[in-house]
Image (cartoon, rainbow, N blue to C red):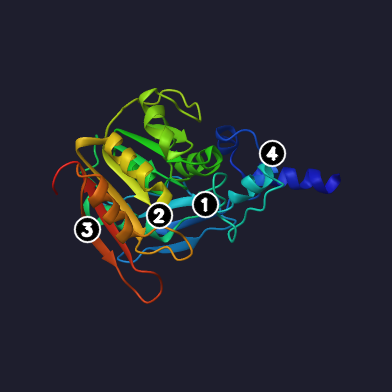
């Protein structure tokens, strides 16, 4: 009992009270110390730096003199919360997807890093100012947070698991010193087939107050969403429902998902055969000897 009290006291002393208040429902000890990773995206290659056992300096600037993002921070121990909430289900970094239960939201995937860098190179900082953005399958929400950082008017974060929104995205907004921008954010959980209707009805699954309402988006961001061909129809329909007439959907993906049913070539073929209103083109190819070939494609409701 004494050891348990000591652990709790240690956790409360190291986790900022603001963070505990933002994400109620889990005992403070399950956060342990704040473990923060930092993505440095201002350089040509994205690097990841551990800030373990160091409370992040929220006054540290995230943008450079040109208005571009220098780095983004995220908590790297949030999966422990999921393990606590669902004790009977084996979830860890090696078992990070369970269909219709948990879709890997507590992991930062490499295609997210590709899209962060692409946005920093091409669309930031000025093109997002005043725009409406949605981060589909957001996971840690780093793409949406980058949009908030660059003055997007409102940003929606969507993930299959509401726990990911509560215990990863919202803490990460805090970690990046953007708590005052939380009223610009809205949070949608659940299957992609429900997303557009939830947005239309003004649903917020985290029940934050003062959030905006919109039906169409200037920018739809997706990363690592093509791993299952059974989702192609949901994704294509969602894109058509969410995009404004001049909007763009950026999908960052591996060409092939070995061991899964989806691939980028098959998705392109599916669009060609079934969705004539959607036009796409490849805007970036990522090829190296360290990982699978990857691409970023841009989709719009008109010819690109």
Q: Residues within 10 Å of mark 1 (few under 14, many from 20)?
A: many
What percent of the width, then of the height, locates residue 221? 33, 46
For the residues labelled 2 and 1, say whether their Cβ atoms are less than 8 Å apart. Answer: yes
For the residues labelled 1 and 3, say whether their Cβ atoms are less than 8 Å apart. Answer: no
Q: Secondary structure at mark 3?
A: strand
Left or right of 92? Residue 142 is left
Which residue is labeled 2 in the image? 224
Mark positioned earlier in the residue sequence (3 or 4): 4
Q: Secondary structure at mark 4?
A: loop
Q: Cα distance, mark 1 to mark 3?
A: 26 Å
Question: Which residue is more in the foreground, 165 or 180?
Answer: 165
Residue at 38% in and 42% down: 234
Q: Nearer the viewer, mark 2 or mark 4?
A: 2
Q: Cα distance, mark 3 to mark 4?
A: 45 Å
Residue at 59% in and 61% down: 94
Question: Picture quarter containing residue 22?
Answer: top right
Which residue is labeled 1 in the image? 104
Which residue is labeled 3 in the image? 283
Tell me the tag on residue 27: 4
Q: How many marks?
A: 4
- Farthest residue, direction front: 273
Left or right of 146? Residue 33 is right
Mark positioned earlier in the residue sequence (2 or 1): 1
Mark positioned earlier in the residue sequence (2 or 4): 4
Q: Residues within 10 Å of mark 4 (few under 14, many from 20)?
A: some
């Amino acid at each position: 009992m004494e050891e348990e009290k000591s652990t709790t006291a240690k956790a409360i002393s190291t986790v900022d009270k603001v963070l505990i208040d933002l994400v109620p429902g889990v005992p403070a000890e399950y956060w342990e110390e704040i473990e923060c990773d930092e993505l440095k995206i201002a350089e040509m290659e994205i690097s990841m730096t551990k800030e373990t056992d160091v409370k992040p300096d929220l006054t540290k600037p995230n943008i450079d003199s040109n208005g571009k993002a220098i780095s983004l921070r995220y908590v790297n121990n949030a999966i422990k919360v999921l393990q606590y909430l669902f004790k009977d289900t084996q979830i860890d970094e090696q078992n990070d997807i369970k269909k219709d239960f948990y879709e890997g939201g507590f992991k930062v995937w490499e295609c997210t890093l590709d899209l962060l860098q692409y946005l920093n190179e091409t669309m930031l900082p000025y093109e997002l100012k005043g725009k409406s953005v949605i981060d589909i399958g957001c996971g840690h929400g780093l793409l949406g947070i980058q949009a908030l950082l660059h003055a997007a008017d409102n940003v929606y974060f969507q993930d299959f698991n509401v726990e990911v929104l509560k215990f990863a995205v919202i803490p990460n907004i805090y970690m990046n010193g953007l708590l005052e921008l939380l009223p610009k954010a809205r949070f949608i959980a659940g299957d992609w087939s429900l997303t557009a209707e939830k947005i239309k009805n003004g649903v917020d699954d985290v029940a934050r107050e003062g959030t905006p309402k919109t039906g169409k988006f200037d920018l739809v961001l997706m990363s690592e969403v093509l791993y299952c061909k059974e989702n192609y129809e949901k994704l294509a329909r969602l894109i058509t429902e969410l995009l404004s007439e001049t909007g763009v959907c950026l999908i960052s993906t591996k060409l092939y998902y070995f061991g899964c049913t989806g691939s980028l070539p098959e998705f392109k073929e599916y669009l060609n055969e079934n969705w004539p209103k959607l036009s796409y083109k490849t805007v970036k190819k990522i090829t190296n000897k360290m990982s699978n070939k990857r691409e970023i494609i841009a989709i719009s409701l008109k010819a690109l």
